[in-house]
Structure formats: C-alpha cells, structure tokens
Amino acid sequence: MRRRVSRQTLAVVGLLCLVLAGSSRFALAQMPDVRQMSGIPRPVDDLPNGSVSIRVVRGDMSHNLSGQPVEMRAGNTTRTVNTDADGRAQFDGIAAGTPVKFSTVVSGERLESQEFPIQPAGGVRMLLVATDPNAGKDAEPSVPAVPGTVALAGESRIVIEPGEETIAVYYILDIVNGAPSPVNTEKPFVFTLPAAAVGTTVIQGSSPRASNKGREVTVAGPFPTGVTSIQVAAEYPVGAGTVEIAQAFPAAMPQLVVIAKKSGDLKLASAQFERTEESVIEGTAVVLGMGKGLGAGQMLAMSVSGLPHHSPTPRNIALVLASVIVLIGAWAAIRSGETDSDRAGARKRLVARRERAFQDLVRLEQEHRRGKVDARRYAERREDLLAALEHVYGALDEDGAGPEPSSAAA
C-alpha cells in the first residue's frame, strides 16, 4: 500500500531533523523532499515580536545560499535584506497585523512565500527552497563495479512522530560507499520492517534505486561512490501506550541516532542507547536516543512508551452488545413454527431490550451534556446504541404482531 505523506507531516519531520543541526557531531542536514516546506510560515517564540527569519537553500538543508537578496512586501512598501553566511535574512520591527509576503530569485527561479499577517506575539521562521538541478540523479558508474561493502553512515537516523492511536516512524538512511569505484555488496541490500508496521512507503526524494513491496525495502546495486540516500516511512499502532520496535539493517550503522517528537510522557528506551535526553529546539520538545552503533544484521530493539491512547474496552463491550442484539433480532425474524405464546414472549423481550437501549441512550446524552464522557467515546457509544435500536425495531417489524406489550410486562 502506498502512503501519501502530507505537507504538515513532512514539516514536522524536517523540524525534528533540525534538532541536531548545530552539533558538529550530528549534522542532520538532509530531509525528505524539503521543497514541500518552502514558503510556509512557522510561528516560533525564539524571535522578537514582529520579526521574520527567512532561510534560503538550494535543494536541501545542507546548501545555504548566502548573499541572496530577499524582498519583503508589506502593503504598499518593500524592504530587501541579504542572507548571511547561514542563508538567513531577518526582518525586524514589523507591526502586528501587517500582511506580508516574501520572495527571492535564484538562478532565474522565483521563490515566493504565502501571504500572512504578523501576529502580536512571537516571530516567524520560513524556508525558501530553490530547485537543485542535480537532485535525485544518482551518478551512473563510469567504471565496472567491484565487490565491496557499504555502511549506514552520514546523516542516518530514525525519526518518530506520535499521532493519535499510532506513531509514524521515518528511517532516514545514508548508504555510504567509501571506495573509489562502484561496489556490489555480497548480499542484496534488503531489509524488512517489523510485522506491526503498516503503510510502508519509500518517500519522494529518495534514490530511485529504492523501492518497497509491502514491508520489504530493497535498494538496488551497484552503489556509486559517495552517498545513496533513502527515506522510508511506516506507522505502528500504539495499543496500550507502548510500541516495541525490533529492526535490523543489512549494513553497519556506526552511529545510532533516534529523534522523537515529545508528546505527553513519551520516553525512549533501549539497551543499545548510551544516553537519552530531552531538549527543546525552536519551540519543539524532543527526546533523543544515541548509541555507538549497530553491526550489519544486528537487531535494534527499542521501546517508545508513555504514548497517548484510548482504552478499547468500552468499544468492545458495545460491539458485543450490538452483536448479541443482532443475533437475537435475526433469530426472531426467522422463526416460523413457534406458537402464538412463544412469539408473544419473544416480542415482550424485544420490547424490553428496546426500552433498555433507549434508557442507555438517554443516560449517555445526559452524561455527555455534563461533560462526563469525552466526544470520541460519546460518538462511538451513541452509534452502537442507535445500531442496536435499529436491529430491535427491524425484528419487531418483521414479527408483524399486534399492539406492543408494555415494557413493565416484560
């Protein structure tokens, strides 16, 4: 199943990848299809009120464009600021409520932001991403490939984004061939995601050598000299608030880095982590897990705990109740050889069940109005009760008997 990755999700992944950007030890520069983040304002609280910082890059986060003029249009006025060595142009002192739009021209390509109003508190950060004409083009071998090995080095890391009832896991892998010529590995570069993973997808922006069939991901050789980058996404159901992940890769990973967006009491744990720590970067809380690395074929075993989840018990009870009522209704509908006395008794029982379902529905509505039941549980329970009532009414209609007996008689 192919899974479309939303612009919002890619923005979150991109932000998490920036967490370690300031560290010389972990320079997390490349991210999946960063162009989808271009021109989208992101409110932050680490800039002065009324300030906007524009970062201009080419292709990915590792190629900043310095000395690039960026124009701000605010109403009928314009202002231009050149980017610094980090590719950033900062505009300060913009009045709250002013509609602004930013643009720049890179090698004849015009980049524009969305128009948005300046908020009274905090600032805004934004990317403007120019097209890299060489993006996505793997160099074809100019010399014959030789037997060799590759490693998961460079910017390889695992990024985790908690959601509702699931977590999204992104395997961002740099396959590095340090030899001066293309290499063919002894075994095919193939790895399989855990059985719990659903919606496995090779994300746009990965090397065209990468593909997946279900949970199995394959990267075709030979591997050119340098880096072959792939990004793979999958979702894992949360269950009881903890997700266990066991994953092996066909090449050694000299440095293990896991980045998780902090949500609730989220914690990362693994015997292979040398340390875990929490950090807040650009207003986003994250949890980091770091270790020495993994050998080829070695299993990474980690748990993600403290995740928000809903107990399935109320829904299961409601489904069981609905199933029982459906079976009773079906049984009542197919009776043919019963006596009048038997049919009257069965009809009384159906009426009694109808009355109880009505009472449960009234009680649910009252609890919902008093705020004793959350909106999700209320919607699920109400739907189940209405379905049960529908089946009871169907059974009563098919019975075709005379006036309904009172519920007290049942």
Image: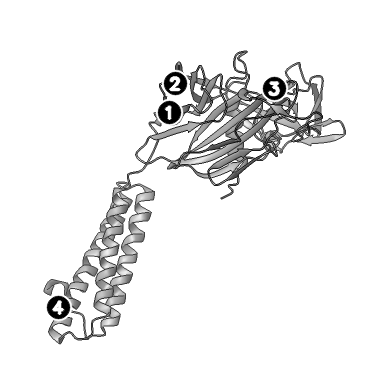
Q: Residue 314 appears at what percent x and percent y?
A: 29, 50
Check disc 3: other Cα within 10 Å, few if <14, some if 14-19, many if 20+. few
Image location of residue 339, percent across then percent down: 15, 86
Query: Which quadrant of the rendered structure holds the C terminus?
Result: bottom left
Secondary structure under the numbered disc 4 in the rendered image: helix
Location of residue 125 by image quarter: top right
**Residue sitting at x 81%, y 23%:** 68
- The residue to which callout 1 is attached is 302
In the picture of the structure, the residue carrying the numbered disc 2 is 272
Residue 303 location, quadrant: top left
Q: Earlier in the sequence, mark 2 or mark 1?
A: 2
Amino acid type, label 2? Gln
**Classed neighbour count for the residue bearing mark 2: other residues with Cα under 10 Å, few (<14), some (14–19), many (≥20):** some
Amino acid type for the residue under numbered disc 1:
Met
- Residue at the spot of label 4: 345
Q: Is residue 200 left or right of residue 358?
A: right
Please give the name of the residue rendered at 34% of the width and 58% of the height, measured from the top-left corner. 382
The first of marks 3 and 1 along the sequence is 3
Q: Is residue 190 above or below residue 57?
A: below
